[in-house]
Amino acid sequence: MKGFLIVFYVIIQILIGVYLSRKIKNEADYFVGGRRVSFFLVSFSLFATWFGAETCLGSSGAVYETGLSGSRADPFGFSLCLFLMGFFLAGRLRKKNYLTLADFIKDRYGSLAEKLVVWVMIPSSIIWGAAQLRAFGQILSVSTALPLNLMICFSAILVITYTVLGGLLGDIYTDLIQGVIIVGGLVTLAIIVLNRIPDLPAIFRQMPTERWQILGVGESIWERLDRWAVPVLGSLVVQEAISRFLAARNPQEAVRACHTAGGIYFFTGLIPLFLGFIGPWLLPGLVDREQFLVMLSHQYLPGMLSVIFLGAMISAILSTVDSILLACAALFSHNFILPILGIKKEKTKVVVGRSAVVATGLIALAIALGGNRIYDLVLLAAAFGTAGVLVITMFGLYTSFDSQQAALVTLVGGLVLTPIFQLVLKFKAPFLLSVLSCVAIFVVAALLAQEKSDRTALDSVKG
């Protein structure tokens, strides 16, 4: 039955992609759905894109192991990130009819900054995509008893195929289906588990005090702030989400969609967190914590419901991976390849975009096969190089600073400071310190550039 479900699910995804591929006439159709997507669809697509493997498998496993402090990112940090995205980014960026965030960077800081920001943003997204592919492989491996690496390869081929075909419209319509399945599957599992627990208050009474602490035991204030800053600030300027609200019909709907998605994400994300919290009393002694939710569904759900829940987990992952592939492809093709090659024909632009989806998917596959835990990959992706992008975006949106030199230096600083602070200097709050350092770098560089410009203008007047 499970094998039949997977095959059926694959066929549905690909058929949707084939159908919607006929509606794609130009680059805007492929990457932002022609900017005519309804508020409802954008909201559910943002939720489904955000609600991936780290929420279903990574965070529930982390809470299973250490208690509430194991997963501050989900759902608290990432849902807050969606709310802030609506407050600070969605309306302003949607007004300009951009295709990518790099388009805005080009407008404010020039084409060189545009090219650099592409290469800062793409690695982060690909790492995140690799985490999702690895999670998909975990689910299929547990469910079919087939080798993990084989299942990771299968998942990559599936997502690449339907994303190449349908573009953003294909992703959004499949996101709607996937989002409904996610919510329904998690609610069903929670209800059945709660009904089968004879004495839930007794479980709570037996829990050690430290499992209730949302802040890590023995952490400094800087460590705690950093653990919150990574999901909240580190994910604020990712192209996967930005492409969704750029597809909205107008700026007002873009803002509302971010806030609505944040609400859906928060309440849905509480379910795997709760199940992981009581997990050691439901499934004691698990060796691989990231398989907790899958193993729980196998034990507590009857045959058909177990199959449906498997579909929910697959849905959560697919909706994130397709967004990542499309986001990376948009940055690479629209902001890098097309300007270099000088391509103007819309059909050729779409072909280049689809080729970029394939290339991105293969790179993510290679990283997924390389190993590492899902939750660790996600946190690495959220912090990788994003400090500089965040700083220049916020300064560009809300100040009059427009120094290209300041933007370039800040991007480079954000790329190198986090690993230096974390791996070399071993600071307790590497990402937060990177953000603060990038703010200082940008302000100093912009002021120096302004001073130089004023001096040059004064010398010209004197001459």
Image: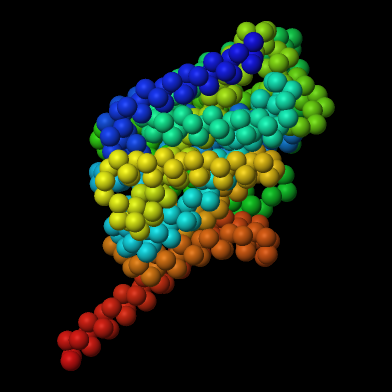
Estimate the x, y position of residue 41 in percent, counting from the top left: 36, 25
When asked about the image quadrant of residue 157, the answer is: top right
When asked about the image quadrant of residue 52, the answer is: top right
Q: In the rendered view, would you say 450 is above or below 295?
A: below
Examine the rendering and report whether any part of residue 211 can be seen.
Answer: no
Position of residue 291 in the picture relative to residue 235 (left or right) = right
When asked about the image quadrant of residue 29, the answer is: top left
Q: In the rendered view, would you say 121 is above or below 273?
A: below
Residue in the foreground of this view, choosing between 142 and 12: 12
Counting every numbered tag in the picture gives 0
- Residue in the picture at 62% in, 64% down: 420
- Residue in the picture at 59% in, 24% down: 313
Residue in the foreground of this view, choosing between 217 and 47: 47
Estimate the x, y position of residue 415 in percent, counting from the top left: 53, 60
Estimate the x, y position of residue 409 in percent, counting from the top left: 45, 68
Position of residue 82 in the picture relative to residue 91 (left or right) = right
> What kind of colouring is applied to the model shown?
rainbow
Residue in the foreground of this view, choosing between 144 and 324: 144
Q: In the rendered view, would you say 167 is above or below 389?
A: above
Position of residue 31 in the picture relative to residue 137 (left or right) = left
Estimate the x, y position of residue 320 in percent, counting from the top left: 51, 34
